[in-house]
Image (spheres, rainbow, N blue to C red):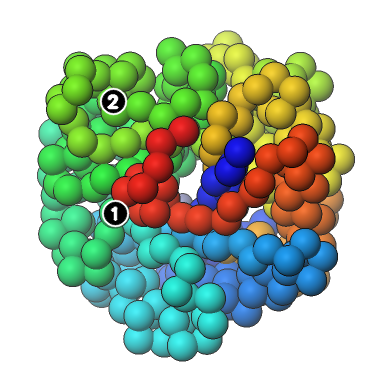
Amino acid sequence: MNINILIGCDCDPDRIRFNPKAKDEQRFYWEGFFTLAENFNKIREEVKLATNLTPALTWNLRADYQTEYYEGKIDYCFNQYFNTIIHTNKYAAIDEIAWHHHHFKLVNSKWLSVFDDGPWMKEHIFYTYTNINKYDIHTVHTGELIMNTDSMNAYNDAGIKVDYSSVPGLANFTGVYNRIDYSKIETNQPYIPSRSDYQKPGMKEENTIIELPTNTVKDSLLEFVSTANYCLRARTFDLSGISHKKVFIPINAHPYLFKRFFKKLISLNEIGTTFISYFHADELLPDSYKSPEARVLFKNEYFTKNIITVINELRNKGMNPVFTNFKTVATTATR
Ligand SMILES: [Zn+2]
């Protein structure tokens, strides 16, 4: 049986934990994005040498009001990719260019995440999509994984074909940096979201957008580690609004965590025919840039090791791993 493997990368500006230059809040640093082809291609080649398979990448490029504010043009990242970066990416033909959309709103000179103002989000979706539509965009991965029924319907109506922002079983109702609710999604199976509830499958032809959830699994040890990491990042120990029935471990995280996560996904049959994971471009910057905590969790050698784990674990179970992208899966296959 073929198992589709989809790896996405959120191409955000560098975060301070991964690039100390990002301390300057007056501008964006995109070093992670500009060096992603070089950094990920090195990983692809190591994987190919070990397994004879070449991973494909879905580049989630930022386009939103905040990008427009700092870079002057809302399609700045798309311009940079198609005019410059593409020439350094010898695997461009197997990659997909997708959209990474942050719902940031400037309020009293501070950027705040909007997660529940449907009309504002709808306007933001249509305004941005109109400006990047010419790049043939099929797929969206939202900033901070924020989604609600209004925004899901607006992405659908604008013309987006695939979303993979959902992380089944995870919710955070009081968090300071993101608020999400995927508590009602029980499995990692794809579905067409209902127009009245983005977490539920709709009647046929209600929407055309397909939700391909990022794989999550139930594991109490990993849940503890992931919650502790959240507490450190959010600087809170108030867990009252958090509902983590499952956990997500990114494909470039420490191999001890990732291997446990992936083996659990297989043993609990939480893969179906698709494995989806994502990471951030700045996580591939040199280790010397990273804060001590970031260095413990993320190293490029971990990424190579984890992709090889995915391939070997699937092959050991008699399954055939196939690296592909979201556009291809949405147009040719179902799980
Ligand atoms: Zn982001």
Q: Is residue 330 left or right of residue 117?
A: right
Residue 190: image location, x then y, percent: 41, 30
- Compared across the picture, whether 303 is left or right of 172 comes to right
Residue 223 quadrant: top right
Q: Earlier in the sequence, mark 2 or mark 1?
A: 1
Kind of element beneath mark 2 = loop
275 or 232: nearer the viewer: 275
Q: Is mark 1 within 8 Å of ligand 1?
A: no
Check disc 2 and give the amino acid type.
Pro
Up the image or down, 44 lies above or below 3; here it is: below
Label 1 residue SS: loop
Residue under label 1 = 138
Q: Nearer the viewer, residue 116 or 244?
A: 244
Question: At 59% across and 52% down in the image, what residue appears?
Answer: 322
Q: Residue at x 45, y 18 (%)?
A: 185
User: Which quadrant holds the N terminus?
Assistant: top right
Q: Observer-nearest residue: 219 or 285?
A: 219
Which residue, given by chain and number where applicable, does mark 2 sit on? 193
Q: Amino acid at mark 1?
A: His
> Is any part of residue 253 visible from this angle?
no
**Residue 288: x %, y % from top left:** 80, 70
